Amino acid sequence: MQRFFDDNVEFKNIVLMVKRSEEIWAKCLQIIRDNVPKNSFRTWFEPIVPLDIQDNVLTIQVPSTFFYEFIEEQFLDLLKKTLHKVIGPDAKLEYHVVMENNSNSEKPYTVKIPAREKTQLVNRPVQMPLDLEANAIVNPFVIPGIKKVHVDPHLNPEYTFDNFVEGECNRLARSAGYAVAQNPGGTAFNPLFVYGGSGLGKTHLAQAIGIEVKKLMPEKVVLYVDANKFLTQYMEATRNNNRNDFIHFYQMIDVLIVDDVQYFAKKEGTQEVFFHIFNHLHQHGKQLVLTSDKPPVELNGMEQRLLSRFKWGLSADLQEPDFETRIKILKKKTYKDGIIIEEEILEYIASHITSNIRELEGALVSLLAQSTLNKKEITMELAKDMIDKLVKSTRREISIDYIQKVVCNYFSMSVDLLSSKTRKREIVQARQIAMFFAKSMTKASLASIGASIGGKDHATVLHACKTVNNLIETDKRFKGDLDEIEKRLKM
Ligand code: ADP
Ligand code: MG
């Protein structure tokens, strides 16, 4: 009985509150209407629903975060004055943002955002389905009615600073990364731009920063994203008209780690959107960590304004590890796995695999696998055998098909186009480049290269090779493209 009574009172209070807020909002609208163009009024104010008023705080409901931000940016002054007039000098405004969860959920979710405190956006409970494999983003905002933000940082717990062996080759990058992790957004290293060849530890180091931040400051929103994933998410978001939600999601991250930004080359749309996200985060003192396979100056196909921002903080490179570091890395791994391998054997591995830590680890793993599978001891003989095979297999011959694939992939076109009759410059050029690499990287004859690429004769291939050689000497951009393709072919 008591309970029913209480509920009933509460219900009545709510009705009263809504009514009062409606009245107040109607008064506000009268003032606003006289101060904004008709169209703006219709677009930005009519959709607003007053929800309640308590202690001079008026809560209004807006349809999206974008809507909320737009109002705050364009009409803040007018809103302030209006509320002041209608409610009084202590008037405050609070927003409820309604976001439809596109994945067929019936209920719109509601989030509270106090006016004029955009940083509060960070406290919205938002989850980004980053796993595109599972499903493409329908709408990056899924708001499970929890108060705290939950963004899966996508960090691999193995990639810690502890597991990252320090050496001459990585000292600067490592200590800069460490400094950033202690004080994200608060050092001069923003962005921290880590570059270096494949398998030299860029991903590991970038993730270590994220892990360390999470360890020291669990409340920070950390996100690791591969540039390719970012690209795909962005395309999906554009296709689903969620571009703004996509941007907003990224704008609430405290430490954003984007791995392999070289993949943004030539993707103008993605660069543009990343530019806005970058600016927003940087302006709000948030930390950016970027990695790339080359330094900013060598990144072709990247907008100048973005490149110049990449250089704002610190660029630090990861170099090939020296012998001692290679040994240290091998020892660390064996120690972690609880295995003892003779020093001599480790030295043999370290002296044969010199330029790539991933391969160094790979060699160790396959040595261990072989010894377990064949129940053989890890001997020098086994190690030599295995290294021999590994080194051979990495020097495999490259096929013409593979070359066509890599070239077309680089120019984002389908392989079929190479054999089309068109005279379009890009296609002709891609074909010539494929022919050029087929000539220099395979043992195939001019005639068979021509036959495989677009059904041309040997003279065409010869002409292609000459043209490409000429362009390499005269056109810097073209040379950049070629270097990149060559690198990918050798990967
Ligand atoms: P990248 O991203 O530059 O291609 P990764 O970060 O993926 O390279 O590193 C390749 C492998 O080498 C990973 O397993 C990583 O843990 C290991 N690795 C790289 N650098 C180090 C290091 N300094 N100490 C220990 N392991 C390392
Ligand atoms: Mg990597």
Image (cartoon, grey):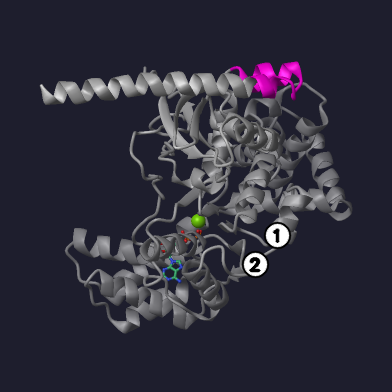
| Residue 346 image-quadrant placement | bottom left
Residue at the (42%, 36%) spot, across then down:
129
- 484 versus 141 height, above or below: below
The three-letter code of the residue at mark 2 reads Ser
Q: Of helix, strand and loop, which one carries label 1? A: helix
The three-letter code of the residue at mark 1 reads Pro
**Image region (quadrant) for ligand 1:** bottom left
Decide if residue 110 is on the left or right side of residue 425: left
Q: Of helix, strand and loop, which one carries label 2? A: strand
Which mark is drawn over residue 157? Answer: none
Q: Which residue is mark 1?
A: 296
Q: Which residue is mark 2?
A: 315
Q: Earlier in the sequence, mark 2 or mark 1?
A: 1
Asked whether mark 1 lies closer than 8 Å to ligand 1, one says no
- Check if mark 2's residue and mark 1's residue have beta carbons within 8 Å: yes
Residue at the (74%, 16%) spot, across then down:
38
Decide if residue 109 is on the left or right side of residue 84: left
Residue at the (23%, 77%) spot, across then down:
340
- 427 versus 381 height, above or below: above
Report the span colored magenta: 30-46
Question: Which residue sits furthest left?
Answer: 1
Dominant SS type (magenta): helix
- The answer to if 353 sits in the magenta stretch is no
Decide if residue 180 is on the left or right side of residue 400: left
Residue at the (57%, 47%) spot, across then down:
398
Q: Give 471 or 149, whichever is nearer the viewer.
A: 149
